[in-house]
Structure formats: C-alpha cells, structure tokens
Image: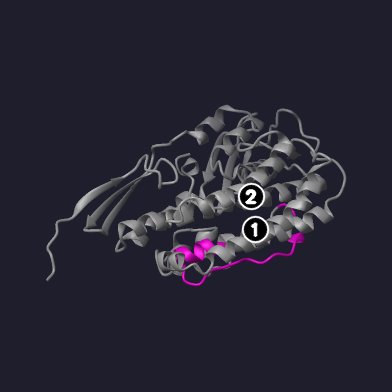
Amino acid sequence: MQLRTEPFVLNIGPVHPSTHGVFRMRATLDGEVVVDLEPVFGYLHRGIEKLAEERTYSGVIPLTDRLDYVASITNNLAYVLAVEKLAGITVPERAEYIRVITSEMQRIAAHLVSVGSFLNDAGAYFTPFLYMYRERENIVDLFDMLCGQRLLYSYMRIGGVSQDLPDEFLPALRKFIPHMRSRINEYDWLLKENEILLARAKGVGILPRETAISIGASGPVLRGCGVKWDLRKADPYSIYDRFEFDIPTGIQGDCYDRYRVRVEEMRQSLRILEQAVEQIPAGEIRGDVPQLVRPPAGEAYAHVEGPTGEVGFHVVSDGSIAPYRCHIRAPSLMNLTALKDMIVGWKVQDLILIFGSFAITMGEVDR
C-alpha cells in the first residue's frame, strides 16, 4: 500500500553546521526524498572586488586571503600573477620555487580539511577529521615558521614572496614528506574499502561529464567525472612545467570519486614537493618592484589550479596605483551550479553528503 504524502519545505541553513559556511538550502521534500532544491546565496557578502578598487595593488593581497580561507596561498598567487602580467614584472627563480612549494603545501592542507569534513558528513564522526587535522597542523607549523601566520598568510608579493625560507624550513619539509605519505597510506587502510563509506558515497550524487564541462566546473569536481584537466598541465604557470606529476581522475563523478581524487592529489603534491626541494636554487626572492606598483592602462587575466579548482583574477588598470576593476573567478561558485540537479531525487542524508563532496568555501562564493 502506498501512502499519500504532502510535500513540505525544509530550511537548511544559513547557519547549519553541515553547510561548510553561511549557505542556505530550501529543500522541498516528499517524505525523505528531495523533490526540489533552491540554493540561497549572499549571507556572507564582503564586497572584496569593490574594496580592491580603493587599495593599492599590494594592498589587495590581504583581501585575497579571505576568499577561500582554507587555501589563502593559492588565492595570493592567482592575484599577483595577474598584476605581474599587467605590469610586465619578472619573478626571480628562487621565488618561483618557493611559490610552488607553498602552493603544494597549501593544496595538501586544504584537501585534508575537505576530506576530513566530507567523512564527517558521511557519518564517521570526528575520528578521521581529527587524524587529518593532525597532519594539517604539521603544514601550518611550517607556514608559521615561514611567515608567522597559521591561516591567512598574505605571503605572496608582486614580483616574488615576502621573505626567504628560514634555515630550518627545508629540513623540516624533507622530514614531513615521507611522514605525510605514510599517513595517506594509513587513511587508505582505514577508509578506501570501508563498507559504510562505499554504501554512502558510491553512485551517490553523480555529476555527468558533459554537465561538468558545460557549467565550467573545475578542480576535483571536474576531474572526479573523468576529465583530465589541471591548469598546472593544461596551461602551466610559474614553473610547473619543470615537474613530473600525474593528474588523478575519477570514473563516474560520484561522491566517492571526488573523495578519491583529493586523496590522490595529495600524493602528487608530495611528488612535486620532493622535486622542488631538491631543485631550488639560491638567489633573490623578490624582483626590483616599486613600493607603489603602477601598471600601464590595460587588463590582464591570470589563473591557477587551486585546491577547489580554477581561481582566476581579471584586473583592469587605468594607470593609477589602485586597480580600476578587479573580478574574481571563484571555483566554488561555478561548481555549485550543478547542485540542484545532483541532489533532486536523493534523500536528506544524501543531500548533506553530496554538498559536502563539493568542499566549497562560502568566502569566495559571496565575495
């Protein structure tokens, strides 16, 4: 006998602990099944793009930290690359290596938070999350050693980086790399074939390959669909063309594939770090750049492969000491475009997991 039920609306957020930021979902349910979903943005709007117009080019760097605050280094890098392209500034060799090292450290740290949070959403209450935060603290200690900050680093500078590596940094990083590799193996032993995780994530929240491409998805969300696209290979920036690494991809674009891509990307980041540590030359860490950068009138776009996907900055100059316009391409916003189609038809508990598998940060969505 089939019971007749009336659809009702469940409001999730904007302060729900499983929404990874100040985000709201109005879900229409038939029993436990989601029949419609309305994502609601705008609760965290900061006006960063407008604020950038009132600051000097260097003064914008701290604003970029606060976009994806779990991956502030890669936000820094995307912005300074755009300004350097606009102003025709050359970056010293040593600074390029430091940028790659810090970016890959940041990628691992961000993926640890993403994977740990996702597993928490899947029902593995806190244990895997705390394990991964344990390793993230090691990376944060290295950043603390480097620039005295543990979250919002503002480390990149137009023409290089803010300061050189301290003497104890590279030995500590060399020690961390094999340690982190063994920890990833430990995660796999605990989780890769875990029966509950497979039941919760396999075949759930499938994003078709064609849809992912058409909406401009990027990062692990795109690569989880089997699309082998990574800007470090597809459009190499900095000195990424000097390193050997692979691009992990998924098969069908479900929650499990997105989780696996992030884990494998941490392994590839360790490969890049090993090569960069051995190759890094001596020399200057910042080019001869004036305190007040004044690019000629024009515009430039630069992008990097951030932990969440393609982070891009379009900067327009009118010849003054502040950007005339600054627009940010936020990967979390683009990836969220498919959220409704991926969730409709699944149950409430799957809604939380699917949303968690995107690993978004609302700071860059509501920028």
For the record, the magenta segment spans 238-261
Residue 134: % across, % down = 61, 48
Task: Name the side, left or right, on which 352 lies relative to 95.
Answer: left
Task: Name the side, left or right, on which 50 lies relative to 263.
Answer: left
The kind of secondary structure element at disc 1 is helix
Residue 51: % across, % down = 53, 30
Task: Name the side, left or right, on which 290 lies relative to 254.
Answer: right
Residue flagged by tag 2: what amino acid is it?
Glu
Q: Is residue 287 visible?
A: yes
Q: Is residue 235 visible?
A: no
Q: Quadrant of residue 63?
A: top right
Q: Residue at x 61, y 38 (%)?
A: 151
**Badge number at residue 135:** 2
- Whether tag 2 and tag 1 are in contact, CB under 8 A, the answer is yes
Q: Nearer the viewer, residue 293 or 73?
A: 73
Whether residue 249 appears in magenta in the rendering, the answer is yes
Q: Nearer the viewer, residue 256 or 181?
A: 181
